[in-house]
Amino acid sequence: MSPMKETMSIERAHVGLVQRLSPNLTGRQRRQLRGLAHELHAVVTIGHSGVTTGVIGSLHDALAAHELVKVKFLDTCEEDLSEAAALITQRTSSSLVQKIGHVLVIYRPDPDEPKLQLVSPK
């Protein structure tokens, strides 16, 4: 496979992951959330132990407090980032907004009082 085709297939796989792990968000809503997340710092950092129950608990707390959270994976983490993203979104009932490098952006609105107003899905 040529380098150009390989790069294109990798990009498609990446886009598919984000769309697959955020079925309740439209592209416009993901774009809005990416813009809001740009200035955020990682609230949760995942190291060599990977996604543990303690990490999931921290993510639940962070999502309850902020709704939109950045998660940073250190180089020492040996888990596959795509598999970890799927596990995190499943266990926290959240949506993956963005995966870039070793950073994930996840979103879970507060069911009672949402803090972020998303654009309407057209």
Image (cartoon, rainbow, N blue to C red):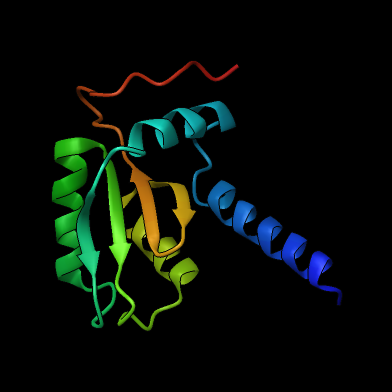
Q: Please indicate whether residue 21 sits to the left or right of residue 33 in the image.
A: right
Q: Is residue 41 above or below residue 71?
A: above
How far across and down, in percent of the image, does residue 70 sit?
Answer: 30, 50
At horizontal 20% and vertical 58% (from top left) the residue drawn is 44
* Quarter-of-image position of residue 36: top left
Nearest to the observer: residue 1 or residue 108: 1
Q: Is residue 88 left or right of residue 22?
A: left
Q: Nearer the viewer, residue 8 or 109?
A: 8
Residue 25 screen position, x and y as percent: 50, 34
Q: Position of residue 113 (x, y in %)?
A: 20, 22
Closer-to-camera residue (48/122): 48
Q: 14 left or right of 8?
A: left
Task: Give the farthest residue toward the right.
Answer: 1
Residue 91 figure quarter: bottom left
70 sits to left or right of 2: left
Image vertical order of residue 52 relative to residue 9, above or below: below
Residue at image location 34% in from the left, 18% down from the top: 117
Quadrant in the picture for the C terminus? top right
Q: Residue at x 19, y 37 (%)?
A: 66
Residue 11 against residue 115 in the figure, above or below: below
Q: How many marks?
A: 0
36 in relation to 45, above or below: above
The residue under the point 44% across, 70% down is 81
Location of the N terminus by quadrant is: bottom right
Q: Position of residue 46 (x, y in %)?
A: 25, 69
